[in-house]
Image (spheres, rainbow, N blue to C red):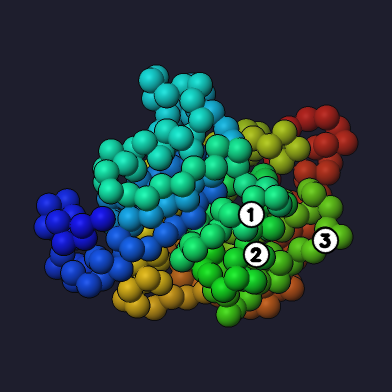
Amino acid sequence: MDAEKLIREEFSRNIGLLNENEQKRLLSARVAVAGAGGVGGLHILTLARLGIGRFTIADPDIFEAVNINRQYGAMQSTIGRNKAAVLAEMVRDINPYADVRVFPEGVNGDNLDGFLEDADIFIDGIDFFEIDIRRLIFNKCKEINIFALTAAPLGFGATLQVFSPKGMSFDDYFGISDDTEYLEKVAAFASGLAPRPYHIKYLDLSKVSLTRKTGPAVSPACTLASSFIATEVVKILTGKGEVRAVPCYLQIDLLRGRFKQGRVWLGGKNPIQRLMRWLILKKAKNAAALGVPDEV
């Protein structure tokens, strides 16, 4: 990779907000992204245009028509194709010198070490409801001493959580363990992602189901989440700005004009978080017992 040529020809408009040494650092960095759909795909493309030069992309799914409203790799021409492979092509179309590894089988316990090999940062683009593999990856990142980032689209907004290898763990922040049942894990994840659930004011709760693993999402929220992620990647790799790891969080809702940079004291042990988790879990279990869509 000719970094000088890339900076001069493709990434010159970054210079002034990044200096040349910072841009070279981005070009030499590897980011591992699990999930190449609504948020993961846009994380990848935003980082590619920012000048990240090395990617590891994992996703076992194919694009479908239902993905077109928010997934930036989803087009009529890509329906039926593996998401990770499509995003790898898009990255190389932006930067032909990019080093891209593809895991079309997704991430699992057998290939996790290979997926994270020489990664500087892990970025979570996994489907909201897939808690166990997410937990496995985040805990592995802490073990191998790399940052792990997640940004969830919520309504017309997003939230950001940064997990430092020297800070609070995924399990401690969300308050889960090996003994936590699946629905409780999902409830804990939901309450931890959105300490300020601004979107509940306008969300049609009948369209959200924990048991059926469905919920609405729109493209502006995915775009916002990717802006959060890309900025944190710059902070971590270049030292520009303050990195505020969990139990700190950042949350914004553009429809309601709300913004909060806060802290969840004690993480999953926080009494308010435990109450939110209990309420979500109760609604999910009641809905499952009745065989109707659960509202959260």
Q: Which is in the foreground here, disc 1 or disc 3?
A: 1
- Confirm whether residue 116 shows in the render: yes
- Label whose residue precedes the other's in the sequence (2 or 1): 1
For disc 1, the marked residue is 112
Q: Amino acid at mark 2?
A: Lys
User: Label 3: few (<14), some or many (≥20) within 10 Å?
Assistant: few
Q: Which is in the foreground here, disc 2 or disc 1?
A: 1
Q: Amino acid at mark 1?
A: Leu
What secondary structure is marked by label 3? loop
What secondary structure is marked by label 1? helix
For disc 3, the marked residue is 178
Q: Residue at x 71, y 41 (%)?
A: 210
- Label whose residue precedes the other's in the sequence (1 or 3): 1
Q: Amino acid at mark 3?
A: Asp
- Confirm whether residue 40 shows in the render: no
Figure quadrant of residue 145: bottom right
Relative to 276, say whether 45 is above or below: above
Q: Which is in the foreground here, disc 2 or disc 3?
A: 2
In front of the other: 20 or 184: 20
In front of the other: 105 or 247: 105
For disc 2, the marked residue is 140
In front of the other: 236 or 275: 236
Quadrant location of the N terminus in the rendered image: bottom left
User: Label 2: few (<14), some or many (≥20) within 10 Å?
Assistant: some
Asked if the residue at tag 1 contacts the one at tag 2, i.e. Cβ–Cβ closer than 8 Å, the answer is yes
Q: Residue at x 70, y 71 (%)?
A: 172
